[in-house]
Amino acid sequence: MNDLTIVDIARLAGVSVSTVSRVINKHPDVNTQTADKVQKIIEEHDYVPNNSARNLKRESMKAVAVIVKGFSNPFFTAMLGIIQQELEQSGYTMLLTQVETDKDEVSAAISLCKEKKPRGLIFMGGNFTHTPEKLAMLDVPYVMLTFTMHWDVDRNTFSSVTVDDYTAGYNVARILAESGHSKLAVIGSNANDVSISHLRVEGFCQYIKDAGLDFGNSQIAYAGEFSYEAGYNAAKTLLEKSEFTGIFCISDILALGAVRALYDAGISVPDEISVIGFDGIDEGRFHIPSLASMYQPDRDMAYETVRILLNNIRSGAKHRHLVFDAEFYKGESFAPCKDV
């Protein structure tokens, strides 16, 4: 990562340092052409102004940045609590940053590293498709929690802690099919998704293919975001275009929205349609009916993430890639198909 200064930006733009400063601070006395030129250079080099050297020095001593993508997902809540607790017990401060689902989490991390100088990074949620060149701009150790990168990225350059999402999705379809459900549906996040939800849908569909069950595009709906309302609307879409007795939602928050949509449509869960989610959030256990779900060991995953990162920061320990199994919790929203 190149730590450009305001002097470097001024030199590249062919203007004075004071002009760059005025552009950064949005003063109106810079002509539009010059301002656009300076701003373009700032964006090309991911330059972040250093507004407080004293604070930067203090924060750089013992800070870990946590970049959360999809902050509305309650699955992250318990893990964040454990991460903060473990970091504080080790003398580190947690710097929490939220990234919207349609934004680039690595670009956000690059900017944060320049501004706050953390000792390490934890990514919670993200995409698989960042290039090795872009990841190389991160000059501190980092752990990807709940996801990892594609295999064409050198896995000796980062760590990851995740579950086997593909196998978990495969097992959901198997559980439904072995319980007599031959007409299945799935709610994913986005048709062009390149994250963990893609693996869950892919595994689910692969079992259906292996089992020779009928399945088509009308049995897949995409929520677009992780929210109760998105799950509700996706379930309504499925009801309008297909028939099914079992539905898999790639997160619990989507599943709870789907259950409500089925209830509003006069459909009994699980007597008429079984619903299975993914994550194992507390809201699912206390919902009526309690939500069947593939449970992730969130607390163990959070603990191991901090342990791996701190070992790497302190001693340069080798990067590790831990894969946990997701376990099926039956709940009350799942039952064998009564048509069998």
Image (tube, helix red, strand yellow):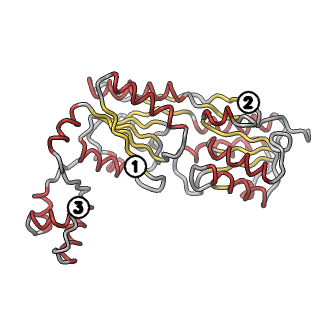
In the picture of the structure, the residue carrying the numbered disc 3 is 42
Q: Position of residue 250 (x, y in %)?
A: 63, 44
Q: Depth check: give the residue in front, 322 or 188.
A: 188
In the rendered structure, which disc, 1 or 2, sits on the residue that comes first in sequence? 1
Which residue appears at 31% of the width and 24% of the height? Answer: 317
| Above-or-below relation of 319 to 102 | above
The kind of secondary structure element at disc 2 is loop
Which residue appears at 48% of the width and 45% of the height? Answer: 71
Q: Depth check: give the residue in front, 8 or 201.
A: 8
Q: How many labels does the image show?
A: 3
The Cα atoms of the two marked residues, 1 and 2, are separated by: 34 Å
* Location of residue 96 (image quadrant): top left
* Location of residue 9 (image quadrant): bottom left
Q: Depth check: give the residue in front, 8 or 236.
A: 236
Q: Give the amino acid type for the residue marked by disc 3 in the picture.
A: Ile
The kind of secondary structure element at disc 1 is helix
Q: Kindly indicate whether the residue at mark 3 contacts the one at mark 2 (C-beta within 8 angstroms).
A: no
Q: Give the amino acid type for the residue marked by disc 2 in the picture.
A: Lys
146 relative to 238 in the view: left or right:
left
Q: Where is residue 195 in the image (x, y as percent from the top left)?
A: 52, 47
In the picture of the structure, the residue carrying the numbered disc 2 is 330
Q: Give the amino acid type for the residue marked by disc 1 in the picture.
A: Glu
The kind of secondary structure element at disc 3 is helix
The Cα atoms of the two marked residues, 3 and 1, are separated by: 18 Å
Q: Position of residue 215 (x, y in %)?
A: 76, 52
The Cα atoms of the two marked residues, 2 and 3, are separated by: 52 Å
Q: Kindly indicate whether the residue at mark 1 contacts the one at mark 3 (C-beta within 8 angstroms).
A: no
Few, some or many residues within 10 Å of mark 1 (<14, 14–19, 20+) = many
In the rendered structure, which disc, 3 or 1, sits on the residue that comes first in sequence? 3
In the picture of the structure, the residue carrying the numbered disc 1 is 105
Q: In which quarter of the image is the C terminus?
A: top right
Residue 277 badge: none
